[in-house]
Image: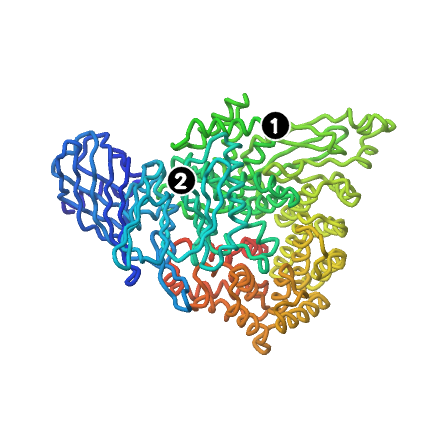
């Protein structure tokens, strides 16, 4: 081992960068060459040396380091004798002959790199101007890709200010960064843009976009300028998102009792982006279909999602940007809270959407993932920073937001809001750990929050509560729930139990702190639950008339298994419309999960499902459809002889609702009605209901003949497109050809996305394979491959899995191992596929 290797070895394989030097300020200049897709730069980093050292260690990846020097505050210049780049550990080690004394100094690094096409770091994407494709640049630094753009201390705890300058920017293009422009200088056909110095922030929040845009703007009540940057000629499509952003900024300022910390907030839609959006401080970057609202092409589902996404990204300016997780172990503090609070503001802006019910669908995703043996805790020890990419998943976002909602329900809204305000004030402009949040909540509420909640964030999984009624005593038993049907290892949780006993006016709450619990309800047994009723003589009489619902309105992150008698009474209550939509959702969701885990028979699930053949609210109908489709998926693999019978059963179940909703929009109908229509028609098409499919094809043909026809409104197009593809085979290809022609002709990104989501829904595996290969073409932007993968038909899942394995090398070459790959794999290797394999 030579001397260079020895020097490097002590820093290799470390979880965190050494902390003997701390960055305070970055003066970053980037010179862009959009013709050859390269960049170069100089970064001057003000650092504080807190411990005398002969080494400086920071992050870099795929950059050429050209020149380095360190100048102390005493103006002593130090040139490193060793400049060692280790791309494996993603570090730059600078070795000096003389020890750098404690104190302040400036580290200067000259570097250069290539604008990559993998939508991470500082990357190239393209826009169309006058029919010509041209290059532009954008950034995506979260989680650990600022180091792809410039050498830096690329960890969330190393907060600093940033002074950014962009040179060689074509005159016609707009340059954006976290802060407003302070100066612009022209030099022939190019310009240099100087931005104001930023507030303190983590490197993953630094952002730059250079492209051709129009914009519209508005101002909050306290003078914050908010802009929405859109493709040229589409500024009107930014109005809806702009409105939401302004309202969200004003709401969060009041809710957290802490002002927004920057003079402006820009939102920009870029043609290619790996995620839905990214909360860079003062410059939120979106993929186009998450920011552009098109009255002709945006469905109700598009509108609701856009509202939640915009609110989520704005919320991060408090949870994440202002108060930042200390390390990636605490990622959920960013994502869980931003998810939860985005629903809070959406509910205030659009109460008619009943959006808290929609959160139940998100919670279900978290419950499904966390029931897998391969799940992980909310707080995961991250030993290599890049591995955190694996944990931007349903646990961090959806389980995270669900346990927050459970805690809010337990503590009460007023105490919870007061606690969050105190937390913001205490940790503003700094970093925090999960324990810091629990400490503040405990102080304000007087409740031992840490004792309760640490189990939920540090322990994998969640409980199922077995609930039984014996005489006049409710008996509780908690065990870990696993979708495989295996039993947990004896772990338990401290669970906020909520109960409704025959009425939502009769509720009781308590903490279940051990494996077993018991609740005496003899007072209800003996009075029948009401002073106006005759006294009952036995618990059996009581059980005939009263229902008991645990986990009221599904506020808790756990499942409930009722004994046969209690479940029978709940079914009667559902049929009699005594149960809220959220609880109807929860009873069905829990019963399906228990059936999936072989805890109850399929016959019990199907008997319960029959009760739902009635008028339903949107959230209940949506979950009913999901359950029916999931049962069909499992039956397809495990009990194929029963599949046709099950499909007909599900069709009969949904027809009442479908006939009530019809195909045509009714003037004045609610957005939830339109959403229900879309969901039920798609379900009937997928189940093969002949009349629905025929009507869909007829309306699609009318739409082909006249794009302005009203017979196929935006909220029914997806059902028609799926019907077209279900009617497409290798012998009858015109459906695929029609949809591809529509895809090529339409400009609206929402419509393009809608078509992509339906292309792989054919039952012919040859067509599915052709569509998957279509993703490799230049016609599908890299960011959009996830839409195609999300629509793979029941019959095409095995083909898709084979395709993934056979094309693996091509996939890695085209999309790399970055942010595009993980969601693609998740869509193809679905939990249902894993569960059906287990059933075999």
Neighbour tally class for label 1: few under 14, some 14-19, many 20 plus, Cα within 10 Å: some
Furthest-bottom residue in view?
731
SS class of the residue under badge 1?
Answer: strand
Decide: is 318 above or below 276.
above
Q: Which residue is mark 1?
A: 511
- Give percent across and percent down for residue 837: 55, 57
Numbered marks: total: 2
* Res. 152 visible in picture: yes
SS class of the residue under badge 2?
Answer: helix
Q: Is residue 554 left or right of residue 740?
A: right
Residue 187: quarter of image: bottom left
Marker disc for residue 328? 2
Residue 634: quarter of image: bottom right
- Identify which residue, 224 or 548, lies in the foreground: 224
* Res. 821 visible in picture: no
- Give percent across and percent down for residue 244: 54, 45
- Identify which residue, 3 or 555, lies in the foreground: 555
Q: Residue at x 22, y 53 (%)?
A: 64
Furthest-right residue in view?
534
- Give percent across and percent down for residue 642: 69, 62
Q: Is residue 559 left or right of residue 534?
A: left
Quarter occupied by the C terminus? bottom right
Find the distance from the CA under tag 2 to the CA under tag 1: 30 Å
- Identify which residue, 465 or 73, lies in the foreground: 73
């Amino acid at each position: 081992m030579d001397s260079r290797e020895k020097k490097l070895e002590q820093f290799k394989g470390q979880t965190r960068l050494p902390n003997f030097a701390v960055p305070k300020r970055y003066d970053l200049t980037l010179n862009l060459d959009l013709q050859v897709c390269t960049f170069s730069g100089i970064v001057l980093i003000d650092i504080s040396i807190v411990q005398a050292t002969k080494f400086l260690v920071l992050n870099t990846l795929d950059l050429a380091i050209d020149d380095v020097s360190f100048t102390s505050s005493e103006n002593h210049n130090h040139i490193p004798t060793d400049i060692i780049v280790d791309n494996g550990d993603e570090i730059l080690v600078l070795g000096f002959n003389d020890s750098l004394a404690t104190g302040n100094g400036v580290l200067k690094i000259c570097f250069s790199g290539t604008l990559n096409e993998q939508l991470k770091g500082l990357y190239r994407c393209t826009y169309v101007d006058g029919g010509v494709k041209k290059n532009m640049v954008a950034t995506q630094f979260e989680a650990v890709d600022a180091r792809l753009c410039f050498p830096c201390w690329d960890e969330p705890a190393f907060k600093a200010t940033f002074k950014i300058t962009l040179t060689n920017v074509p005159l016609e293009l707009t340059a954006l960064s976290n802060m407003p422009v302070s100066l612009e200088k022209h030099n022939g056909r190019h310009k240099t843009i100087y931005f104001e110095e930023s507030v303190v922030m983590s490197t993953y929040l630094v952002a730059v976009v250079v492209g051709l845009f129009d914009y519209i703007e508005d101002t909050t009540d306290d003078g914050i300028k908010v802009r929405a940057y859109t493709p040229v000629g589409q500024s009107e499509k930014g109005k809806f998102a702009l409105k939401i952003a302004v309202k969200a900024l004003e709401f969060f300022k009041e809710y957290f009792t802490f002002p927004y910390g920057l003079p402006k907030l820009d939102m920009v839609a870029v043609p290619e982006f790996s995620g839905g959006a990214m909360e860079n401080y003062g410059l939120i970057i979106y993929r186009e279909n998450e920011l552009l609202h098109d009255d002709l092409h945006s469905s109700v589902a598009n509108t609701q999602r856009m509202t939640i996404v915009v609110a989520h990204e704005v919320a991060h300016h408090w949870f994440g940007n202002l108060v930042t997780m200390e390390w990636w172990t605490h990622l959920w503090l960013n994502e869980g809270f931003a998810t939860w609070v985005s629903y809070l503001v959406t509910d205030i802006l659009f109460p008619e959407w009943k959006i808290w019910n929609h959160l139940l669908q998100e919670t279900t995703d978290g419950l499904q993932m966390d029931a897998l043996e391969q799940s992980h805790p909310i707080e995961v020890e991250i030993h290599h920073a890049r591995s955190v990419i694996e944990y931007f998943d349903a646990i961090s976002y959806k389980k995270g937001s669900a346990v927050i909602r459970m805690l809010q329900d337990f503590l009460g809204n007023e105490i919870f809001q007061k606690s969050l305000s105190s937390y913001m004030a205490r940790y503003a402009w700094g970093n925090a750990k999960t324990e810091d949040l629990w400490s503040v909540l405990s102080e304000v509420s007087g409740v031992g929050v840490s004792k309760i909640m640490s189990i939920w964030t540090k322990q994998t999984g969640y409980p199922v509560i077995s609930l039984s009624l014996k005489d006049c005593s409710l008996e509780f038993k908690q065990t870990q729930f696993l979708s495989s049907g295996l039993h947990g290892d004896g772990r338990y949780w401290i669970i906020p139990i909520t109960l409704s006993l025959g009425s939502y006016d009769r509720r009781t709450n308590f903490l279940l702190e051990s494996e077993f619990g018991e609740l005496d309800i003899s007072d209800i047994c003996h009075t029948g639950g009401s002073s106006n009723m005759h006294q009952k003589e036995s618990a059996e009489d009581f059980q005939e008339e009263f229902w008991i619902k645990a986990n009221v309105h599904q506020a808790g992150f756990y499942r409930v298994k009722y004994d046969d008698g209690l479940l029978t009474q709940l079914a009667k209550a559902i049929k009699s419309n005594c149960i809220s939509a959220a609880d109807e959702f929860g009873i069905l969701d829990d019963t399906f999960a228990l059936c999936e885990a072989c805890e109850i028979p399929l016959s019990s699930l199907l008997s319960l499902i029959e009760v739902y053949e009635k008028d339903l609210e949107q959230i209940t109908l949506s979950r009913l459809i999901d359950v029916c489709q999931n049962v069909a998926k499992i039956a397809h693999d495990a009990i194929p002889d029963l599949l046709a019978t099950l499909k007909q059963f599900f069709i009969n179940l949904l027809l009442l609702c479908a006939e009530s909703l019809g195909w045509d929009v009714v003037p004045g109908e609610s957005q939830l009605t339109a959403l229900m229509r879309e969901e039920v028609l798609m379900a009937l098409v997928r189940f093969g209901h002949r009349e629905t499919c025929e009507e869909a094809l007829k309306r699609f043909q009318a739409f082909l003949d006249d794009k302005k026809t009203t017979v196929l409104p935006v909220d029914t197009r997806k059902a028609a497109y799926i019907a077209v593809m279900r009617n497409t085979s290798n012998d009858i290809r015109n459906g695929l050809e029609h949809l591809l022609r529509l895809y090529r002709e339409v400009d609206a990104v929402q419509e393009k996305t809608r078509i992509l989501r339906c292309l792989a829904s054919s039952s012919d595996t040859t067509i599915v394979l052709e569509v998957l290969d279509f993703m490799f073409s230049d016609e599908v932007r890299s960011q959009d491959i996830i839409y195609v993968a999300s629509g793979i038909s029941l019959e095409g899942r095995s083909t898709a899995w084979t395709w993934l394995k056979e094309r693996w090398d091509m996939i890695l070459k085209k999309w790399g191992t970055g942010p595009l790959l993980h969601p693609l794999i998740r869509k193809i290797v679905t939990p249902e596929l894993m569960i059906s394999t287990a059933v075999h």
